[in-house]
Structure formats: C-alpha cells, structure tokens
Amino acid sequence: MQSAAQSEVQSEVQSDKPGNSTLNQQPQRQAEKPSSQRSSQCAGRVSALVMDVLHGATWRPAWRLLTAVALLSISWLAFTPNPPPAADLGWDKANHFAAFGTLAFLGMQCLRARASRPGWVLAALLAFGVLIELVQSQVPGRDADAQDVLADMIGAVIGLLVHAAFAWLIVRLITRRSAG
C-alpha cells in the first residue's frame, strides 16, 4: 500500500511527462493584475487606514491616551515651580501657544465628528487655561497672568485651524488619488 504522500509524488511525476493528459487538467494561473490596478488597491487600503486613523472610532482610544499624556505633561510643566529649561521655547506666551495648539489638535481627534466639537474643545481648553492660572497664583515662583489665558486661546484656535486644514488636505489627497 502506498502512502498518500507517495501517491501525490507519483502523480506529479506522471504529470510532468511529455504527452501526459494530466498537464491539461492543472488549473490555469489567473492572469496577473496590471501594476496600476495593484497600486490603486494599495492606495485604497492606505486611504482607508488614514481615514480610520483620523476619523475612526477604533483609533479614538489611542488619541485619548495621547491627549491624556499631553495634558499630564503640560500640567506638570505649568504647576512646577521651576520647569526644566529644555521645555522652554524662550518666551512664556510661546509655551502657552504651543501647548494649547497641541491640545486643541488632539482634542479634536478625541471626540466624534460633530458640528459642536470645536466649541467643546475650546470651552474645555479655556477652563483648563483658567485653572492653570489659578493654581499658578498659589505656586511659589509662579504668577497668574490673564495674557497667558489669551495666549492659550489663540493657540487653541490656531490648533483647531491646523486640524481642519490637515483633515481637509488628507481627504483631498485621498479623494484625488482614488479618482485618478
């Protein structure tokens, strides 16, 4: 009695002999797809991934974690009597501007896309900016400044605009690539 492996090898050997009719019974290879179709499918997968990262619910927890890390880091820098010089941009208002612009961008990624989302992000960041100034008024070596809250809000608005421009550009690039 032959084993299954031996009979398989014999059938392969027989099919390789010239004039054997088993050659015609082998399944034909599917025609390879043109490279333009393969690249278009690849671009479609990349587009879907990018859109999922930007707007999908599956990535929202990752954006929220990143936002929480940013909030904790910014809070530590704001509440520390002597923040490290490496974290200083050279001008106090630039620090506020950069921190709140980053938080606004991340905040937009944390919430579902709705018309009220920018308003919620701005309200939350205004409250956070005021809280920072109230706490800083109690920290030795720090002082509260209403201009810091203004710098916070300018940074937050710019962060929202950067987010909107970035999202628009990504969607435009993806739709242009998929249409072309």
Image (tube, helix red, strand yellow):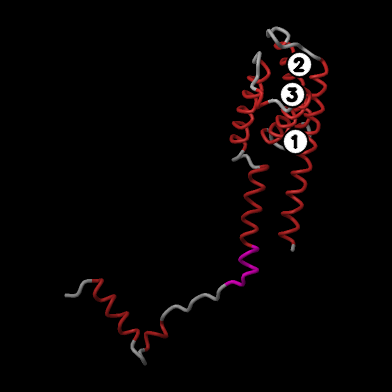
Q: Magenta segment range?
A: 33-40
Q: Give the Cα distance between marks 2 and 3.
A: 9 Å
Residue 179 rendering spot, x and y as whole percentages: 74, 61
Indicate yes or no whether the magenta region holds residue 37. yes
| Residue wearing tag 1 | 114
* SS for callout 2: helix
Occupied quadrant, residue 85: top right
Circle 1 packing at 10 Å, graded few (<14), some (14-19), many (20+), is few
Of mark 2 and mark 1, the one earlier in the sequence is 1
Q: Mark 2 points at which residue?
A: 130
**Vertical order, 105 against 42 (above or below):** above
- Is 22 situated above or below 49? below
Disc assigned to residue 125:
3
Q: Where is residue 105 in the image (x, y as percent from the top left)?
A: 72, 34
Q: Which residue appears at 72% of the width and 59% of the height? A: 177
- Under circle 3, the secondary element is helix
Distance Cα–Cα, label 2 vs label 1: 25 Å
Q: Which part of the image, by quadrant, shows the C terminus? A: bottom right
- Residue at 74% from the left image edge and 14% from the top image edge: 133
Q: Which amino acid does label 3 sit on?
A: Leu
Q: Which amino acid does label 1 sit on?
A: Arg
